[in-house]
Image (spheres, grey):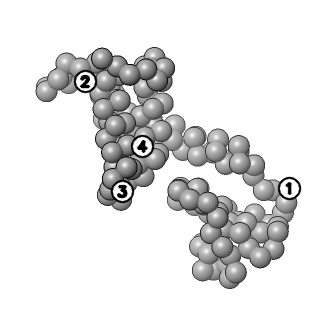
Amino acid sequence: MHAGKHKGCKLVGNGPHVHYESPHDFDMLFHFGNYYKLVTDVADKESLGERAAQWLESIAKLVREKNQAYGNSLENPVRIFTDTSPLKLVLARAEDKLSRIMRGNAAGEDVISDLVGYIALAKALGWNGEKLP
């Protein structure tokens, strides 16, 4: 489903979780990752907080999948090229994502989701936002 199938819909928002509004107050088409949800009843409209929570759940799933695919490489790195701490490793990856965002070079990736995942990993490693030496 996309806006083309819903004549008169307009795109609202930006990023991976935009939604389409129809000319009617009661119809909205929400986009979450790889699926769309058509909302036709005011009572069914999800709050911004609920949509954010669903997106964060998708990030949690992404973090789990990547952690499994990479063999828990942050907590148990193979240490071929560096002996840097896991926290510094994850923050370096987050900086790479920020660099792509700032330079407009996403290369087809969802850099925002990746960035949020790396920040979550940094928090799980005890980071509180301080600059590291």
Q: Earlier in the sequence, mark 3 or mark 4?
A: 3
23 w.r.t. 50: above or below: below
| Disc on res. 94 | none
* Residue at image mark 4: 114
* Residue at image mark 2: 77
- Whole-angstrom CA distance, mark 1 to mark 4, is 32 Å
| Disc on res. 43 | 1
**Residue at (34% x, 49% y) in the render:** 100
Labels 2 & 3 near each other (Cβ < 8 A): no
* Residue at image mark 3: 104
- The one nearer the camera, 53 or 87, is 87
Residue 17 visible, this angle: yes
Q: Dot 1: within a 10 Å radius of its alpha carbon, few (fewer than 14), some, or many (20 or more) residues?
A: few
Labels 1 & 4 near each other (Cβ < 8 A): no
Q: Dot 4: within a 10 Å radius of its alpha carbon, few (fewer than 14), some, or many (20 or more) residues?
A: some
**Residue at (56% x, 59% y) in the render:** 14
Residue at disc 2, secondary structure: loop
